[in-house]
Amino acid sequence: MEQKKWPETWREVTPGCIVFTPGSASTYKTGSWRAQKPVWDNSKCIKCGICYIFCPEACIHEDKNGYFYADLDYCKGCGICAHECWPQAIKMMEEEV
Amino acid sequence: MGKRIGMEVAIAAAEAVALCRIDMAAVYPITPQSHIAEHLSDIVHNGQIDAEFLTVESEHSAMSACVGASAAGARVYTATSSQGLILMHEILPIASAMRLPIVMGVCNRAVSGPLNIWNDHSDIMHVRECGWIQLFAENGQEVIDMTIQAFKMAEHPEVMLPALVNIDGFQLTHMIEPMEMPSQEEVDKFLPERKPFAYLHPDKPVSMGCFNMPDIFMETMKAKDMALRNSKKTIIKVWKDWAEIFGREYQPVETYKMKDAEVAIVTMGSMGETASVAVDEMRKAKMKVGLVKIKLWRPFPEEEFKAAVKGCKTIAIMDRAVSFGGVNGPVAAEIKSLFYHEQERPKIVDFIMGLGGRDVRVEDFISMAERAKKKKEDTFEFLGVRE
């Protein structure tokens, strides 16, 4: 049985919420409970990558210029990256709804 | 053909489990369930059936092991009582949410404290909301029958939910009763091999017990509730299949002398036997009293219960658990909400009785029915308590 998409209505929930496509967790977007998002000031960033290492969601990625950004589909807004950043290049900002 | 036997009911329950050709049992002994644990262990270790018997370190582990084995496709059984059931509590809604057809015998016993090992229904009422099919057996024969039936109900592709059989501690577990033990051929004919909807296997990977965000959790809970509500059709069908093979009929709500009854006594479990003697006595004295026995507690048989008490003026409920600080006992709560919208609802009188092994005699049922009849309105009281 193939998982076509994530369920919309209760009738589409598979018995026991079984997921039939292995390795599909990344297609389930889990960023919706975030209240604040991390914003980088690249003029302060020293490209050390400590934010990338500490991110418990592993949702911080490196761009082609060596700077970092968070994938907001998964970022929970925990603020660990901002707390750990030595040169204080990351600020947690309220999200605009 | 089945065999007429005289046997202790707990031993018979273990024998019935063996007839179901289980693959695994994880049971932690606790009074008054111990004889099921001990005898099932004997059956497995004597090589009578080809199954694993897991000697786990607690009931929490027993239920966790059952979840794992059932997820791997095994036919699984466990049994417990009271404190053991409460220690399992954390895993019970997980088993039903994962739609795993585990079967469990619950040998009903009072919940501590103070420590008390005797029978009432306070343990099962603690886990009422866990999403399991919940049956109540009245005598030894029903324990055998419902244990076997529970596997078929739980594993049915239209159901896929765990099921438990309530067996009154001591009053049933430790009684020696005359019963009919079905033969292996009959049980094989009735109960097909388990064909799981999905199972854990490296060749066909699936993920079970996944995380749900707020955006899908409500839908998941509705799906689970609908699965349990819809299981009633299959439960009734399984009972019909049973009657065809074994000749013994089961219904979600059983009635006794309810025709023209003005007062209905409501019981669950073994007390139905004593209550039926009380009804006979009262009928002799020209009192229009009947008995309604709830055999299926979850999913609650709404239409069947209403039909059973139709035309009845007074319902006298025997509640064998206390909902501390609540409006009334758990059975009365269910039945009152069932009749709330009715134009002409019966008077519903709730009695807390038989807690922690306190004897309930024929005379107690008679006094209960007489008191209920005299009441002007719905009431709630402890019956037989020293004031």
Image (spheres, rainbow, N blue to C red):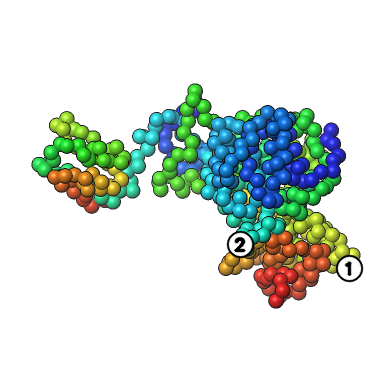
Residue B270 point in image, percent of width and height: 76, 54
Q: Quadrant of the C terminus of chain B?
A: bottom right
- Image point (72%, 60%), residue name: B357
Give the quadrant of residue B186: top right
- Secondary element type, mark 2: loop
Amino acid type indicated by mark 2: Gly
Q: Tell me residue B303's x, y (percent).
A: 68, 53
| B245 lies above or below B387 | above
In the displayed structure image, the side of residue B303 where residue B245 appears, left or right = right
**Mark linked to residue B113:** 2
Q: Nearer the viewer, mark 1 or mark 2?
A: 2
Residue B67 seen: yes
The residue shown at (23%, 52%) is A94
Residue at position x 85%, y 36% from top? B3
Amino acid carrying label 1: it is: Ala
Relative image position of residue A38 (x, y in whole percent): 22, 46
Q: Residue at x 79, y 67 (%)?
A: B364
In the picture as drawn, the residue positioned furthest to the right comes out as B284
Question: For mark 1, does the 10 Å Cα neighbourhood hold few (<14), some (14 to 19), or many (20 or more) residues?
Answer: few
SS of the residue under disc 1: loop
The reply to the same-chain question for discs 1 and 2 is yes
The answer to whether residue B336 of the structure is visible from this angle is: no
Count of picture labels? 2
Comes first in the chain, label 1 or label 2: 2
Q: Quadrant of residue B256?
A: bottom right
> Up-down: is B29 above or below B313?
above
Tell me the distance, in whole angstroms, between the alpha carbons under discs 1 and 2. 41 Å
From the top left corner, tell me how far across and down residue B23 is, in percent: 64, 32
Locate the N terminus of chain B by quadrant: top right
- Subunit of mark 2? B
Label 2 crowd bin: few (<14), some (14–19), many (20+), radius 10 Å: few
Q: Which label was assigned to residue B285? A: 1
